[in-house]
Amino acid sequence: MRKKRFILCLCMGIAGVVFALEAGANPSLLPKEPPKGWILAEGPRVFTKVNLFEHINGQAELFFKYGFHRCTFAVYKDRNNPDRQIDLDIYDMGNVLQAFGIFSRFREEDRSMDIGLDSYLDDHSALFYQGKYYVALYATGPNPDVLKQLATRVSGSLSDSSPSPREISFFPKEGLKPGSIQYMSEGLLGHQFLKRGFQGTYVDGNKESKLFLAVFKSPEEAKTGLRAFRNYLSTKGKIVQEIPAGFGPNALRGKAPYQGDILVLQKASYLVGVASPEFGGKEEECLADFVNNVK
Amino acid sequence: MTSRLWNADSSFAATQKTPSLEYRTLGKTGLKVTTVSMGVMNCSDIAVVLRAFDLGINFYDTADCYMGGRNEEMVGKAFQGKRDKVYLQTKVHAHDEKRMQASVERSLRRLRTDYIDVLVWHGHNSTDEVSDREQFDFMEKMKKEGKIRFSGFSSHSRMAPLLREAANCGYHDVALVSYNFTHSKELKEAVAMAAKAGVGIVAMKTQAGGYTKEKMEGLNPHQAALKYILRDPNVAAAVPGVTAIEQIEECAAVMGTSVSQRDLRELKAYQAFLENRICTLCGGCTGECSYGVSYGDLLRAVMYHDGYRNDFLARETVNSSLSRQIWQRCSECSSCTAVCRRGLQIKEQIHFALTLYPHDA
């Protein structure tokens, strides 16, 4: 009886591996062992650009904007209570910048679980990015302990050791709302002309401001971006002529619809700026630190 | 008018030129929605939603899962204090009733409201799902509890049979379907059938990878794509997924514009122009290359380069998808066997992709 069961398990295992390989899935991305008391109940299945819609519906578009390559999906279940389930998605986003970008669009606040390059954990979900991978785990019921255990094991099976995008380190620490730095693949601050870049939220009393870093291909393109910003402010907002001392000739100050006061300058291939409902706090000081950090 | 997020005065925007608003009735819901509405899902900044509101757009599509709920939160923040001026559509996934109920409650919290105007099932793929009695009963329960006003389903595939089923079963008030100038006559007829049965049709993916203005004479392709779909009177609203203020302004400007003979000619030219350029990633040509070249990625790179003008994405796609050896194979191959059922000139597109970033190859 025991021998029959062993053969059956072996056949199922081989069939699973064959299916996974045929489907293009990479079983080595999954942890060798699930957490104690849990089993791999489904997968791995792989989703590509062709069929990601079938897996995550319209949300696929956001992943495409971040250079999605493929997703390896698996389902884990509690051996004693199959209603308790965790869905695991390992997204290969092509590089660490895009993995961080998509992670930053999903995490809600700073609730790190110290896994990968940055992570987020709540009762129902665990998210992290590591190298080119963005990993999302969702539990059917509150289960942070097992989520963390499984996330730790997945992290151990991912081989990409790329460091986090260096632009993250440009943001000054003082006043930074933890977990607020995001990378937008397009439409930074809601503008086409700013294209892609980073933003972080700063808290000063009841007021929230944003530091932003628009990334261009060259200093010339960044200057073009600044001209577009100037044009936008002059037609839809207001330009303020007085530029605070120390920000140089390539700076622009004004008031923008929806964003409020803006101070932005070009440095190398970047536009570095601050947006705030109304200046009057530490915005200029914060921006000066930010500009100094930009290398 | 004040934005709660930034406490910034939005009167700047309100004083800008506003479009002539055009409304249609969303099927049997009776809701009067702006024909150009907004798909919020990819939106990166609340400023875009606020701009849409200032432009007069009144129907917004989001989902429980977009950005892990942050998308709903953005919508909730944007419309706090303005809830009675907008219609909100969000989604729920089919699970057991407890989970679905919890999902609806979460959506209500994030949207900062006590009712959802339209709740749709996320991504139906089969006619069985469309006519599922249990799912219908759940939506009816939500309606009785006052949590939602109307219900429907969304679909990205097999839309024609699903719409026909919706017309027959009468379970749905709204259908959110992928519908644009690249789709078939069969879908157009199914849209008409569903609309006649009272199903409010909301079109998504209306842009189908819009192309650059410079490629045509005078016509803005994003606007053309919207105009094209709104010419169908059976479509109540389109929800283009915009990410920037400039895009929503461009889309909103389509409302109230009449379609002249010149426009029709340009639309026809636009459609003809796109017919051989847009890869819908249907997968129909997969495996047709005897060398196993992953040319689908090359076609997508062309779309990023030409259509979205996103060189970064195009370069990333090209660089990451093919090895140097495969590049070599493609550029030296004189017998491309790949065939597109939609008439896309795959060989030409591949060769164009090969010329995009010669230094990276």
Image: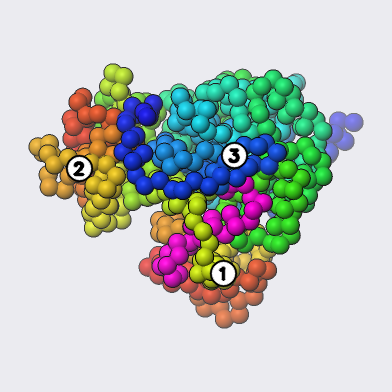
Q: Residues within 10 Å of mark 1 (few under 14, many from 20)?
A: some
Residue plotted at (28% across, 18% down): A205
Residue under label 3: B32
In the displayed structure image, the side of residue B159 where residue A278 appears, left or right:
left
- Mark 2 → mark 3, Cα distance in angstroms: 39 Å
Q: On the image, which quarter does residue B146 sit in?
A: top right
Quarter of the C terminus of chain A within the rendering: top left
> What residue range appears in magenta?
B211-238
Q: Name the chain under label 1.
A: B
Mark 2 vs 1: CB contact within 8 A: no
Residue A78 part of the magenta segment:
no
Subunit of mark 3? B
**What residue is shown with label 1?**
B268
Q: Amino acid at mark 3?
A: Lys
Discs 1/3, front: 3
Residue B302, image x, y percentages:
49, 64
Label 1 element class = helix
Out of B339 and B320, give the one closest to the viewer: B339
Task: Bin the neighbour count of mark 2 within 10 Å (Cα to Cα): few under 14, some 14-19, many 20 and up.
Answer: some
Mark 1 is on which residue type? Lys
Note whether A112 is above or below A181 in the view shown.
Answer: above
Of mark 1 and mark 3, the one earlier in the sequence is: 3
Residue A219, located in which quarter of the rendered image?
bottom left
Residue at image coords 49%, 56%:
B257
